[in-house]
Image (cartoon, rainbow, N blue to C red):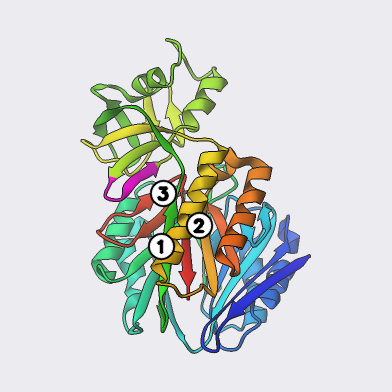
Amino acid sequence: MTDVTIAGTRTRWVGVGHAVAEDDAAGEAAGREAAAAAVQGADPALVLVFASPFTDLGAVARGVRAQAGPDTPTLGCTTAGEIAGLTVGSGHVVVVALGGPGLEIRTASADLADGPRAAGSAAASCMDGIDRPHRALLLLYDGLFLGRSEIVRGAYSVAGAGVALVGGGAGDELAMRRTRQLHGDRVLANAVVAAAIGSDAPIGVGVGHGWRRVGEPIVVTASTNERILTLDDRPALDCFLERLGAPPGVDSTDETWRIRALSHPLGLSRPGGEEVRAVIGVDFEERSLLCGDVPQGTMVWIMDGDAESVQAGTGIACDEMLASLGGHPPVGVVAFDCAARRNLLGPEGTAREAEILTERLGAPVGGFYTYGEIARTRGSRGVHNATLVLLGLA
């Protein structure tokens, strides 16, 4: 089954198509069908591919490029779920196509083994030569890599303050084993892939999460890029579980409290509001929290939320993105929605969120559920978890 939504002007258009692809055998056909649905305008400038991890990404890419053309810049990744208009869930290939003479696109990729800051800088090199009045850098990265702040710093060092950074972490449906990234016809691992977008019309970014602070702040007294070791000079897991009301002696056999810990992210105070960090794992032996991009010395809050508050965050992201377009209606939107939000909302909630996005934005929407999000419109920071990030093109 395929679906398509397309909108645009004479110089810029965006199309979104999807096809069911639940296994490797369906990959190439699904890629071809989704691309045929999405690429409806002239002069395709960029094709974004968001594919179920149960599908062969290389086969998907062959199908997409056979339909869109081998010279069309292609970027993508595996996901923790896919978004195409009112269709949300798993087992799909989603293609978002951008085109028209009003857009200019360049792409690049880099290996995280070279170091996250160097990889971010190398990926951002595709900004060279983009001289349209409105610019953004879209980044897709291995979502199991927790040093995203260094990727963003590296990209920022090249792109500069005048370029919005936006994107998301590739997923694998919460298996937490392996993700894949796509650049052209190459399937990569442990990589950052990037698209520099130049446009004759405004580009907008919106961010919203809907999580709320609970209790008093806590100081991160020891951390690494991947773990929080101590909070308020105590083992991080002990302090965290105590704040959640867990009884003494909770260990790895108590699944109830393990799940409760994973459903309460941490909030870091930033100008304009909190940046959220998901606690994606706990180490009961080390008594630490697996939670990246939380610098030592940072003050954090435990965050809480429900379906209603998270849906409110969806509205905030929509309003912020539309406002940043300066009154111009979007011709298309790329959504980076965290897998933690999908888990909290459930099937009914994600369907409702898709309705909100479609109704509020009035434009084609395509994207995926991520392992972390990037949204930087000011300063050198901009890493998020459990957050919805929207990239809109006028």
Q: Residue at x 51, y 26 (%)?
A: 260
Q: Amino acid at mark 1?
A: Val
Per the rendered image, the range of residues in magenta is 270-276
Q: Is residue 274 magenta?
A: yes
Q: Label 2: which residue?
A: 336
Label placed on residue 166: 1
x and y percentages locating residue 304 in the rendered image: 45, 32
Q: Residue at x 33, y 46 (%)?
A: 273
- Residues at circles 1 and 2 in contact by the CB criterion of under 8 Å: yes
Of discs 3 and 1, which sits in the foreground?
1
Please indicate, yes or no, whether residue 181 appears anywhere in the rendered image. Answer: no
Neighbour tally class for label 2: few under 14, some 14-19, many 20 plus, Cα within 10 Å: many
Q: Is residue 144 above or below residue 361?
A: above
Give the residue at x 38% y 71%: 136
Q: Is residue 239 visible?
A: yes
Q: Secondary structure at mark 1?
A: strand
Q: Is residue 209 magenta?
A: no
Residue extending farthest top:
248
In screen coordinates, is 363 left or right of 102?
right
The residue at which mark 3 appears reads as 145
